[in-house]
Image (tube, rainbow, N blue to C red):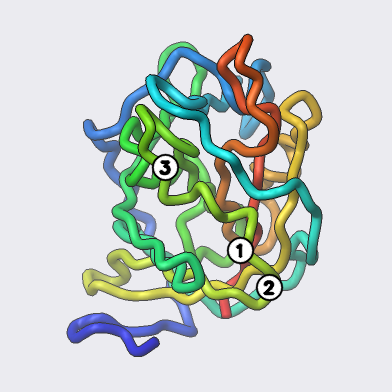
Amino acid sequence: MPPPAGTKDHTMSDEPSMRPRASANSGWVPFLCVVAAIIALAGSALTWVISPNWGGQHLTTAKARNIGQVPTAPGALAALVSPNMIEIPKLAAKAPIVGVSTLASGALDVPLNPRTVGWWNGGAKPGARKGTAILDGHVNYKGVDGVLSRIGTLNPGDTVYVRGLHNGKQTRVRFTITGVRTYHKTALPYKQIFDQKSVGRLAIVTCGGPFDAQTGNYLDNIVAFAVPA
């Protein structure tokens, strides 16, 4: 897919050090779909919170599966200081990205709008040479399916584009899916997913699996891993 006018693909990087800004468009939802625990990460306590279905029919998510590999090989990247858009051609999915951070409670903020994706600005930038860039989103909200609701159907080799600013210019970085993992929320490997010492990679996360009507939670997490193409 050719980039639009004014956007360039990048294969080499020099990594700016500007901190991203947090967005006021993100919201914390007090029901836990993903994590009901506090973890130690980068010297601080962090709870990961992603909401289940709120006020609508629950979503039938992709069947649980584990395919491909969790990436371990480096690539040539362009670190995006302010990622602002994700595109997943196979899913015909496109959504804005907003920066999210940790709250006073230690919870990781998540955009309330299921058609918006959050980027954890306490972790790696998408396209950085080192660390995991975390993108997350609700599987659905008030009957609206999330833009990430079908990431469980992705396969190794599928493409993900992330757009944002690199050296002051709007830039598109291409990633290739290397594997998809489904984890029960009580067995989520936090350290592996949030690893900031890994080679540069992307981890895209949402809820999935069976829906527990009694608790109002999905029981699993779906994580799609990707490396720069």
SS category of the residue bearing label 1 = loop
**Residue 185's x, y, as percent?**
72, 28
Q: Which callout, 3 or 2, points at the residue further toward the start of the chain?
A: 2
Task: Give the numbered dot on residue 145.
Answer: 3
Give the crowd class for mark 1: few <14, some 14-19, many >=20 residues within 10 Å: many
Report the side of 209 relative to 77 (left or right).
right
* Whether residue 15 is visible: no
For label 3, the SS is: strand
In the rendered image, the vertical position of residue 164 relative to residue 14, given as above or below? above
Tell me if residue 21 can be seen. yes
Q: Is residue 229 above or below residue 26?
A: below
In front: 83, or 87? Answer: 87
Residue in the foreground of this view, choosing between 170 and 188: 188
Disc 3 packing (10 Å; few <14; some 14–19; many ≥20)? many
Q: Which quadrant would the N terminus be assigned to in this image?
A: bottom left
Q: CA distance from mark 1 to mark 2?
A: 6 Å
Across and down, in percent, residue 126 comes to 47, 60
Residue 169 vertical position relative to residue 10 in the rendered view, above or below? above
Q: Which residue is mark 2?
A: 74
Residue lying at 51% horizontally and 52% vertically, measured from the top left: 124
Identity, as a three-letter code, of the amino acid under mark 2: Pro
Quadrant position of residue 33: top right
* Residue 141 x/y as whole percent: 39, 31
Which residue matches tag 1? 200
What's the distance in space between the residues labelled 1 and 3, CA to CA?
Answer: 29 Å
Closer to the chain start, of discs 1 and 2, is 2
User: At label 1, which amino acid type do we have?
Assistant: Gly
Q: Nearer the viewer, mark 3 or mark 2?
A: 3
Label pair 1/2, CB-CB below 8 angstroms: yes
* Image quadrant in which you'd find residue 44: top right
| Residue type marked 3 | Asp
